[in-house]
Image (tube, rainbow, N blue to C red):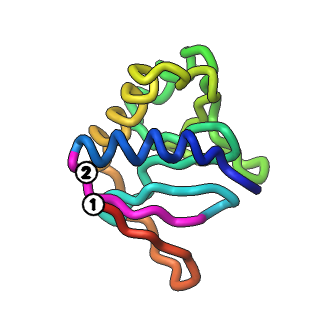
Amino acid sequence: MAYDQHLADRVSVFLKEKRVSFETRNMMGGLCYMINDKMAIGIMKDRLMVRIAPELYEQSLKKKGVRRMDFTGKVVKGFLLVDATAVDMEEDLEYWIQLCLDFNPRAKSSKKSPRVSTRRSM
């Protein structure tokens, strides 16, 4: 499964401008951004995958173009998928990325897999 390289570039540029240290990993058929060894942001096809604070989850689902992340038919707790049309404008993309950055210090660390391709940035 391919992912939207233009969206990936936009996410990377924003993170670099914010001086956020991150690495990218090819996971789940897409691209994941790891911040502090935690999955924070991802791109699946042309959708933005976001990991946000639990208290913002239900409220965020009410926004246009947002749905629960259901990978292989099972809802992944704490993650949402945001349609490409909902992050077309830079301020919309920045809004979602900032929610991920705000939650990241509180998020639990992901388990490490030795078979994952990693590229470090920043």
Q: Position of residue 1 (x, y in %)?
A: 76, 56
Please name the amino acid that badge 1 sits on: Met
Return the residue at label 2. 20
> Is residue 45 visible to the viewer in this orientation of the structure?
yes
Q: Would residue 110 be found to the left or right of residue 115 on screen?
A: left
Whichever of labels 2 and 1 marks the residue nearer the N terminus, that label is 2
Residue 12, position as x, y percentages in the image: 40, 48
Magenta-highlighted residues: 19-26
Q: Is residue 37 above or below residue 98?
A: below
Residue type at mark 2?
Val
Q: Does residue 53 appear in the picture of this structure? A: no
Q: Residue at x 69, y 59 (%)?
A: 29
Q: Is 83 rendered above or below residue 32? A: above
Left-right relation of 118 to 105: right
Evaluate if marks 2 and 1 touch, with contact meaning CB atoms under 8 Å apart. yes
Question: Considering the numbered disc 2 on the image, is that residue within a helix, a strand or a loop?
Answer: loop
Front residue of 72 and 89: 89
Classify 83 as above or below 29.
Answer: above
Which tag is nearer the camera, tag 2 or tag 1?
A: 1
Which residue sits at x=67%, y=49%? 3
Majority secondary structure in the magenta region: strand
Q: Which residue is mark 1?
A: 122
23 is within the stretch colored magenta: yes
Please name the residue shown 63% across and 21% down the image. Answer: 85
